[in-house]
């Protein structure tokens, strides 16, 4: 058996990140942008004053960021999603 050209394996580390939004940053948005972003599950749009009050409540609870959708495993309301690692490899 020859070892002159041994097979190689390329391993690529993949990381998935889930999106979140900075609460303090979004508080400065225009009213129409807030009402487009924050919609209840039933499609009801809340008034901007309600949204801003809710965001300030989230800050008062110590949250800095909010997830888009349901929070992923390991989500931090301080830093967001730190990423989810996975490796895939194939022989070359």
Image: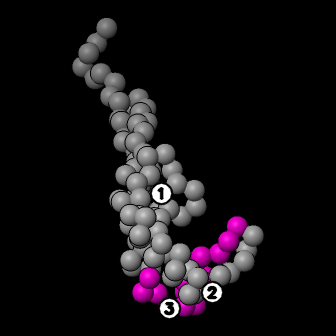
- The crowding category of the residue bearing disc 2, from other C-alpha atoms within 10 Å (few below 14, some 14 to 19, many at least 20), is few
Query: Label 2, on which residue?
Result: 47
Q: Secondary structure at mark 3?
A: loop
Instruction: Give the residue displayed 41% in from the left and 29% down from the top.
Output: 91
Query: Label 3, on which residue?
Result: 30
Please tell me whether residue 34 belongs to the stretch shown in magenta: yes
Residue 47 falls in which quadrant of the image?
bottom right
- Where is residue 80 drawn, in percent x and y? 40, 58
Q: Secondary structure at mark 1?
A: loop
- Where is residue 40 drawn, in percent x and y? 68, 71
Q: Is residue 40 left or right of residue 14?
A: right
Q: Nearer the viewer, mark 2 or mark 3?
A: 2
Quick one: which residue is furthest to the top in this view? Answer: 1
Q: Nearer the viewer, mark 2 or mark 1?
A: 2
2 to 23, vertically: above or below:
above
- The crowding category of the residue bearing disc 1, from other C-alpha atoms within 10 Å (few below 14, some 14 to 19, many at least 20), is some
Q: Earlier in the sequence, mark 3 or mark 1?
A: 1
Please tell me whether residue 84 belongs to the stretch shown in magenta: no
Q: Earlier in the sequence, mark 2 or mark 3?
A: 3
How far separated are the C-alphas under marks 2 and 1?
27 Å
How far separated are the C-alphas under marks 3 and 1?
25 Å
**Is there any visible trace of residue 65 in the rendered image?**
no
Q: Secondary structure at mark 2?
A: loop
Instruction: Give the residue displayed 58% in from the left and 61% down from the top.
Output: 69
Query: Label 1, on which residue?
Result: 18
Quick one: which residue is furthest to the right in this view? Answer: 42
Evaluate if marks 2 and 3 touch, with contact meaning CB atoms under 8 Å apart: no
Q: Quadrant of the N terminus?
A: top left
- Where is residue 84 drawn, in percent x and y? 42, 45
Evaluate if marks 2 and 1 touch, with contact meaning CB atoms under 8 Å apart: no
- The crowding category of the residue bearing disc 3, from other C-alpha atoms within 10 Å (few below 14, some 14 to 19, many at least 20), is few
Which residue range is magenta in the image? 27-41
């Amino acid at each position: 058996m020859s070892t002159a050209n041994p097979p190689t394996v390329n391993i690529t580390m993949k990381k998935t990140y889930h999106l979140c939004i900075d609460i303090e940053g979004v508080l400065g948005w225009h009213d129409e942008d807030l009402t487009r972003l924050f919609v209840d599950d039933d499609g009801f749009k809340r008034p901007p004053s309600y949204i801003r009050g809710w965001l300030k409540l989230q800050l008062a609870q110590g949250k800095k960021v909010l997830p888009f959708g349901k929070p992923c495993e390991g989500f931090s309301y301080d830093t967001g999603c730190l990423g989810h690692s996975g490796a895939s490899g194939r022989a070359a």
